[in-house]
Image (cartoon, rainbow, N blue to C red):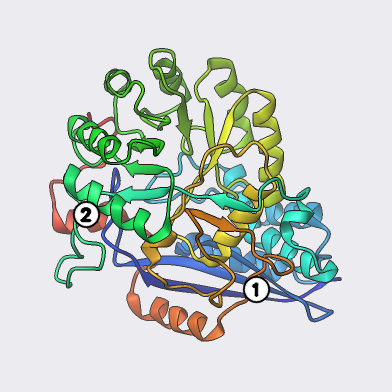
Amino acid sequence: MRIREINVTPVAFRDPPLLNAAGVHEPWALRTIVEIVTDEGLTGLGETYGDLDHLMRVRDAAEALIGHDVYGHNAMYATVAGLVGADVVTDLHGLTGTSSRAKTVDRIFSPFEVACLDIRGKAVDRPVVDLLGGRVRDAVPYSAYLFYKWAGHPGAPEDGFGAALDPDGVVEQARLLIGRYGFRSIKLKGGVFPPEQEVEAVHALRAAFPEHPLRLDPNAVWSVETSIRVGRELDGVLEYLEDPAEGIEDMARVAAEVPMPLATNMCVVTPEHIPPAVRQGAIGVLLTDHHYWGGLVRSAHIATLCETFGIELSMHSNSHLGISLAAMTHLAAATPAVTHACDTHTPWQDGQDVVAPGALRFVDGAVPVPDGPGLGVELDRDALAIMNEQYEKCGVRSRDDTTYMRSVDPSFSARRPRW
């Protein structure tokens, strides 16, 4: 079964002003939707980043992959690697760690791999989770992903989530998301305010939700000394502390001095980072992300490797739509080593999606594995057309949290470490 056609569609959807170490989310988030059509008429879906540099390379890869066998993942990967050559695609926001050629290849290849798995599942009338070894859980738990945020974008009306700029606002946001989706664990995106304020917010969350595991992610803007101090202050409070400091060496220094495991989606982002991280004891939890670990199969391989070395797993999230949520759910459902609730931005999309409603839902904070073959989701072509039109009109072509923040606060600095 060979690839006859690949449609690559950039889309934009509204995003709230979510604050982070790099600045603040712009009013529009970007994604790229990949649809593969085979010579037998089966179609498969993939989703990836929307920044223009990445989009251009995805389009180039789509042309080069025409005629490939949908079962020939190794040949497809080699084709993508050949196209990339020595090029490196770098994110402006810097929230997913260092960039490299290997990471560039993996992130370009990923949506095509997911789409081919979707097709293969449809061809045999089985869900993707079965192609990854079969389910170890019927539903995948996700966390309430909290952000400091403004009430609305500058010059725009307040959004439906409200402001969260202090501990009370963070707790109210948690109540909203937990009440709406039933989440049973909580993650706070930090690195926005001085550490003392974020520690206060974590303690407020602990008081309000005494049974919910808590995580804090300052995106590597703390020094080693600050990371150790905060880690010790939050002894017995955090499930894990995510990326407090930058790089494997500094993370290892922190890990040796704090009581909780350290997690990362920033200092270990390609297979070559795993040996030094293991040698130095830098992390206890890896937040995998199939979007830049090369797809679902390669991510499953990384999960097995991590399990061998006693590294636990969760799953990283960026602003995404339902194709990605479905892929994440199938992967986590088939991966025994995923022992922590996964991250998702889905609540912040507030119902905007390119997949037809009904296949994906939250039940007590978890997403049941979709019932249908393949990914179990179908493209909503009307919604896709609307989001593509929004892309053409919105003017955003690359995510740049820092420049947007400086348009509001010219003094803002994204330097690391900041505290």
Q: In which quarter of the image is residue 110?
A: bottom right
Residue 203 appears in view: yes
At which x and y percent is residue 419? 22, 28
Q: Residue at x 55, y 57 (%)?
A: 367
Left or right: where does residue 157 sit relative to residue 27? left
Find disc 2 in the rendering and name its residue.
405
How far apart are the two marked residues, 1 and 2, measured between alpha carbons? 34 Å
Looking at the image, how many numbered discs can be counted on the residues? 2
- Of the pair 36 and 131, the residue shown nearer to us: 131
Find disc 1 in the rendering and name its residue.
35
Q: Quadrant of residue 43?
A: bottom right
Q: What is the residue that sits farthest to the bottom in this orientation?
A: 382
Q: What element carries label 2?
A: helix
At which x and y percent is residue 209? 32, 40
Amino acid under disc 2: Met
Left or right: where does residue 199 sit relative to residue 180? left
Left or right: where does residue 65 sit relative to residue 242? right
At which x and y percent is residue 375? 67, 65
Position above or below: 362 against 140? below
Q: Residue at x 62, y 23 (%)?
A: 310
The numbered dot on residue 172 is none
Q: What element carries label 1?
A: strand
Sequence-wise first label, 1 or 2: 1
Amino acid under disc 1: Glu
Left or right: where does residue 180 sit relative to residue 102? left
Q: On the rendered image, what quadrant is the N terminus found in?
A: bottom right
- Of the pair 244 and 398, the residue shown nearer to us: 244
